[in-house]
Image (cartoon, grey):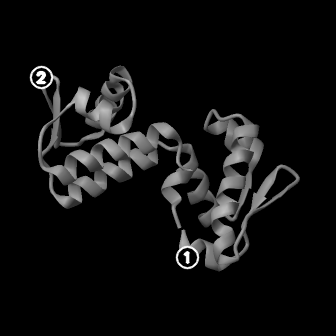
């Protein structure tokens, strides 16, 4: 199951940049990251700055026009979790697991997402959950997930 594909592009790219720098153990320039992620340099720089601001004790550093990660594995995992916490789709998955009922209009207003985009994400979530015979149902502007198995898998 690829829950990574459910996340919005910004979150996926921030995690990709962090993962690439962490696992390579070397300094990466903005140009190298732009080429690796197939994004423009300005977007990559913005993503790197967003990750850098989330870094608690400056593990994700900027040196000139280059970036490097100097933290441990637990620092890396905490930074990934910080990135995920900013993702509305992650909040949707979390709410479906913990609350089992999510009011679509209320959730979209709280997270500044249009209802149509939110419904599209719910459809994508259901496509992935279909592989394990789970799904969340959309009824009367609510999203309901009853099955315990879905909650444990997510």
Using the rendered view, name the quadrant where residue 137 is placed: bottom right
On the question of residue 68 being in view, the answer is yes
**For this view, does 122 lie left or right of residue 52?**
right
Total count of labels: 2
Using the rendered view, name the quadrant where residue 94 is placed: bottom right
Label 1 Cα crowd, 10 Å radius (few <14 / some 14-19 / many 20+): few
Rendered residue at 65%/68% (across/down): 129
**Front-most of 37 and 22?**
37
Rendered residue at 12%/22% (across/down): 64
Numbered disc 1: secondary structure: helix
**For this view, does 126 lie left or right of residue 60?**
right
Residue 120 in the image: state x and y as whole percent. 71, 46
Numbered disc 2: secondary structure: loop
**For this view, does 51 lie left or right of residue 115?**
left
Q: Check disc 2 and report the residue beneath it.
A: 64
Residue 138 in the image: state x and y as whole percent. 81, 57
Residue 74 in the image: state x and y as whole percent. 22, 60
Residue 83 in the image: state x and y as whole percent. 39, 45
| 145 versus 148 height, above or below | above
Q: Quadrant of the C terminus?
A: bottom right
**For this view, does 141 lie left or right of residue 35?**
right
Q: Check disc 1 and report the residue beneath it.
A: 152
| 144 versus 83 height, above or below | below
Label 2 Cα crowd, 10 Å radius (few <14 / some 14-19 / many 20+): few
């Amino acid at each position: 199951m690829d829950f990574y594909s459910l996340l919005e592009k910004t979150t996926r790219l921030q995690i990709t940049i962090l993962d690439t720098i962490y696992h390579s153990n070397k300094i990466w320039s903005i140009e190298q990251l732009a080429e690796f992620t197939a994004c423009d340099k300005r977007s990559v720089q913005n993503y790197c700055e967003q990750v850098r601001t989330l870094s608690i004790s400056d593990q994700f550093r900027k040196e000139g026009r280059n970036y490097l990660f100097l933290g441990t594995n637990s620092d890396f995992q905490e930074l990934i979790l910080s990135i995920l916490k900013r993702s509305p789709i992650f909040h949707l998955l979390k709410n479906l697991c913990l609350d089992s009922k999510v009011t679509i209009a209320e959730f979209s207003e709280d997270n500044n997402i249009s209802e149509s985009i939110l419904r599209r994400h719910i459809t994508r979530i259901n496509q992935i959950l279909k592989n394990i015979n789970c799904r969340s149902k959309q009824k009367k502007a609510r999203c309901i997930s009853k099955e315990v198995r879905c909650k444990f898998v997510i």
